[in-house]
Amino acid sequence: MENNIVFSGIQPTGEMHIGNYFGAVANYVRLQNVGQYQTIYCVVDLHAMTTPYDPSALRRNSEQMFIDLLACGLDTDRSIVFVQSMVPEHTELAWIFSCVCSYGDLTRQTQFKEKSEQLEGKQDAFISAGLFTYPVLQAADILLYRAANVPVGQDQKQHLELSRTIANRFNNQFGEYFPEPQMLATETPKLLALNDPTKKMSKSLGPKSYVGLFDDEQTVRSKVRAAVTDTGDPDTPISDGVRNLLSILRACGHHDQAEAFEREYAQGNPRRYAPLKDAVADALVALTHALRMRRAEIAADPQRVRRLIREGAEKARAIAQQTMRDVRRLTGVMAGSDL
Ligand code: AMP
Ligand code: TRP
């Protein structure tokens, strides 16, 4: 049978934004709901340690991200949802993978270059080895569950190529065992920053760059209103900022409205963007309002949330332990022998 296992991970670094949602998380939910996949989703707290972070906030943020994922529509009866560090097999497999991943492959990872450059600009810059080997842990996350399908945004493309390289090299060296993970993208694999459409929407560009998935109406409206567009001069092409707004509108399900704007802009008159911004804001307000209500409902029962986190880890661990039994045998480490 074709591999039907889906795996993805998201870092617990504060609030989710519409880029995460339309680029990845909406796809987590869709794949769960089509019913033909075994879907496994992970809050990757160990990945959040690769850049400077606050230890006293990490557990809280992991729990919050778990709640946010449920609010987005993940259902623990249909998906395994868990927190990475509760399944220690992730780090064991990451070590083994670090021995089949070449140093050269890691040096070519553009995300490492970008993030380390960002850090270098700061005072007391510290670039951890963990930031460098991060894609090895990511490959371990996916392959521990032998998943071949990975819903992520465009920025993860290179990491997934590396996870295929790692799977191949492992299979060549130790025997055919792992599948080659493929990226599953949405229609909006890369939303651009509202305040700077030359870059992808990201928390690291500050709150003006994104709309938070749980932002209130006023915040959503003011951020969309401030989005960078263009002068609307019919002799100049439509800018990336405007295209980005149109794709947000489509991602919200308002295809007809988006097409109507496009037709209007094709007529060669000066373009006015206030109606487009209003339509985008209305669509996002409806989405974020519904999500905020769901989140409040789920957060109102912290006992249940904690039970679900424990149960998710147990389910994930059962699979992870089986994989590690096989991997220890294939690689010849002493653990798992009959000694
Ligand atoms: P992160 O918050 O970096 O853990 O990202 C979580 C998921 O959201 C990953 O699958 C990313 O590829 C995706 N993602 C992050 N930013 C964007 C964006 N601007 N557009 C589309 N997808 C994104
Ligand atoms: N690196 C991903 C990001 O920054 C998060 C991640 C960690 C992930 N492990 C993963 C994504 C496994 C997909 C599969 O967004």
Image (cartoon, rainbow, N blue to C red):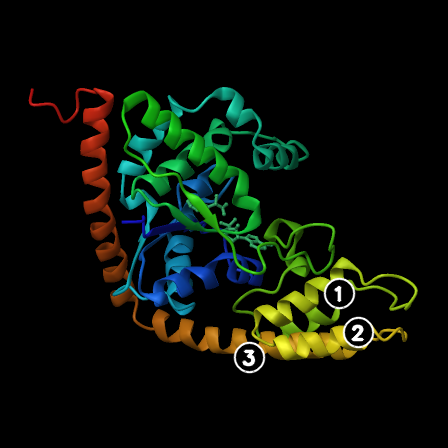
Looking at the image, which residue sits at the far front?
1
Q: Quadrant of ligand 2?
A: top left
Q: Nearer the viewer, residue 107 or 32?
A: 32
Q: Is residue 165 left or right of residue 203?
A: left
Q: Is residue 234 left or right of residue 151?
A: right
- Asked if the residues shown at circle 1 and circle 2 are in contact, with their CB atoms under 8 angstroms apart, the answer is yes
* Residue 133, above or below 55: above
Q: Position of residue 333 (x, y in %)?
A: 21, 20
Q: Nearer the viewer, residue 266 or 155?
A: 266
Q: Is residue 266 visible?
A: yes
* Residue 273, above or below 207: below
Mark 3, residue position: 286
* Number of the front mark, 2 or 3: 2
The span from disc 3 to disc 1 (Cα, nearest Å) is 21 Å
* Number of the front mark, 3 or 1: 1
Q: Quadrant of the C terminus?
A: top left
For the residue marked with disc 2, what is the amino acid? Answer: Tyr
Q: Secondary structure at mark 3?
A: helix
Q: Neighbour class for label 1 at 10 Å: few (<14), some, many (≥20)?
A: many
Mark 2, residue position: 273
Residue 31 occupies quadrant: bottom left
Mark 1, residue position: 242
> Mark 1 near ligand 1 (CB under 8 Å)?
no
Q: Position of residue 78 (x, y in %)?
A: 28, 64
For the residue marked with disc 1, what is the amino acid? Answer: Val
Query: Image point 45% across, 61% down: which residue?
Result: 27
Query: Image point 75% across, 65% down: which residue?
Result: 242
Q: Secondary structure at mark 2?
A: loop
